[in-house]
Image (tube, rainbow, N blue to C red):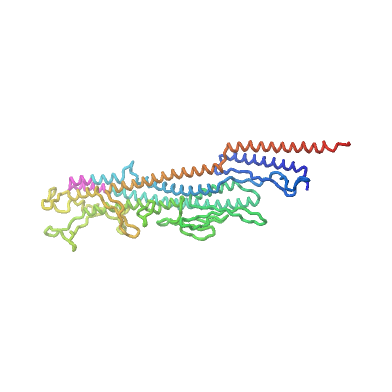
Amino acid sequence: MMRSTFAGFTTATLALNASHRALEVTGQNIANINTPGYTRQRLDIKSLYLRGGEFYNSNPNARIGFGVEITGVSQLRDPFLDIQYRLQMGKLGTTDAQVAGYEKLANILDETNSSGIKNALSDLASQLQKLAQNPNSKEYDSMVRSSSQILLNLFHQNATDLQEVRKDLTSEFRDTTIPDANKIIQNIAELNESIKNSEILGNPALELKDERNELIDELASYLPISVKYRDHDLGAGFTVEELDIYYTDADGTSYKLISDNLTGILSANADGQPVELYITDAYGKGPEEITDSIGDGVLKGTLDILNKSGGFDAPPSDIRGIGYYEKSLDSLAATLAETLNKLNAVEVKDADGNPVLDVNGNPVTEKRDLFEPIDPNQPMSASNIKIADKWANGEYGITISNVEVPNGEGDNSTGATADENVLKMIKALSADQQFTYMDPAGNKVDFYKGSFYNCFVNMENILNIDLKAGNSTLDNKITVINQTADLKDSISGVSLDEEGINLLHYQQSYSAAARLMTTLDEALDKLINGTGVVGR
């Protein structure tokens, strides 16, 4: 079969069209150089070859193609970098949520630039010192009680503020974070449907894919996901691409979160403690609890702050959340009350003035508690502590001495002084105490040894360490994710220099195709008008 003489014009025309379309794609890239989420596009072409077309009287293997064929327009993306970027987004989301929680706690417990519990403890010791100098003064006893009330008010305020942080974070998690994640999931599914419908009509819908990729990246900041693509056969050899998104927990269990236009849903049970997170997959299976198995993301970071208590957990956890600081403050308040209540007790004596002993031979004491729980059915804590009613209404005051001595004088037989017990209280405030807590199994566990003042300082220091470590980790995560983003942009981003070179390249190829057509026209003119004139 002889190749058509005019086939060269078809080749030139196809070359012109390909160069023209390439210029249009380059222009589209340049126009969107500042568009967030835009992925650089490329014209896909291949050599056009039709079987059977060949030169007359030539070797069958010496065949020439018919030009260039435009097969489509595609995006330049690296799937590996997409995966790495989404992994880093999850880690960044975890740290960011934790740091946000620590910053809220620092606003409550950091007394670097404010007066609070530390000053109140110092003032209590100062007022007790004044009482020791005036052991029988009701006025100074009242001053000690007022100082104690100020300290308790600060305990109450801090405990209330910690509860408010917990309440706010829980409400935000339930009413904002979870709905936002579910909205992203729903939007991705809707874009899946739109993209599939566009591809059925022959439109690659690249801009819709850019929008979907942005949402997928955002979803990856909430929880760890993996993205899989598959071809859906529509018949007659025609396929369209469909996208599935899976959530895989730390135990390796996978849940299909998005299957084409089907979606799963996230939900939270925030009515009690701990806050629980659930997932229902795209096929309606569930809800399954994933609170403790979630890997990374904003959801994990928030749950860590809300649910974990560091060394107070059983077994101990790696994150000191709100619970750690609540329990530390409760232990501080309870130990203070227990210590001063014990010192304020008075030994019971018989008619002869001798101590009354119990069955074990220990002196029997009369309780004169300075502090008592607001709710007697609940343990003493920072929120459940008050001045004892009998101290408040004057039935008794600070016990000056555990033994009876003449007013303002010493007792030579016992070595006691009129201010003996008050001095013990002052010493107890600055002495090392063993601070404990009750673990979930009901066992008493030691967690800090030191003075009351230093116990609160230790809480401050630990919070500052957590906050600084979180900010340092956050900076590192941001650096890593920026590096990954730069690598992505080197492939998917629009480079003005590269596109400028492409403009020159495609403009020259367009000119060359036009010159080919001119050359073919001149050759055909010679063939038609310059041959076959012999014998005319």
Question: Can residue 321 be seen?
Answer: no
Q: Is residue 353 above or below residue 480?
A: below
Residue 224, percent across and down?
49, 52
Report whether 439 appears left or right of 406.
Answer: right
Q: Residue furthest front?
A: 59
Q: Nearer the viewer, residue 80 or 158?
A: 80
Report whether 472 appears left or right of 485.
Answer: left
Q: Is residue 286 above or below residue 100?
A: below
Residue 1, percent across and down?
78, 48
Write down the region rendered in magenta. Answer: 127-148
Q: Residue furthest bottom?
A: 359
Residue 355, percent across and down?
15, 58
Q: Is residue 214 above or below residue 438?
A: above
Report whether 316 appears left or right of 513.
Answer: left
Q: Main secondary structure of the magenta part?
A: helix
Q: Quadrant of the C terminus?
A: top right
When asked about the image quadrant of residue 464, the answer is: top left
Q: Is residue 451 magenta?
A: no
Instruction: Name the residue: 70% across, 38% down.
Output: 513
Q: Is residue 129 magenta?
A: yes
Q: Nearer the viewer, residue 55 or 254?
A: 55
Question: Can residue 473 be seen?
Answer: yes
Residue 418, percent across and down?
15, 49
When asked about the image quadrant of residue 494, the answer is: top right
Q: Nearer the viewer, residue 528 or 387?
A: 528
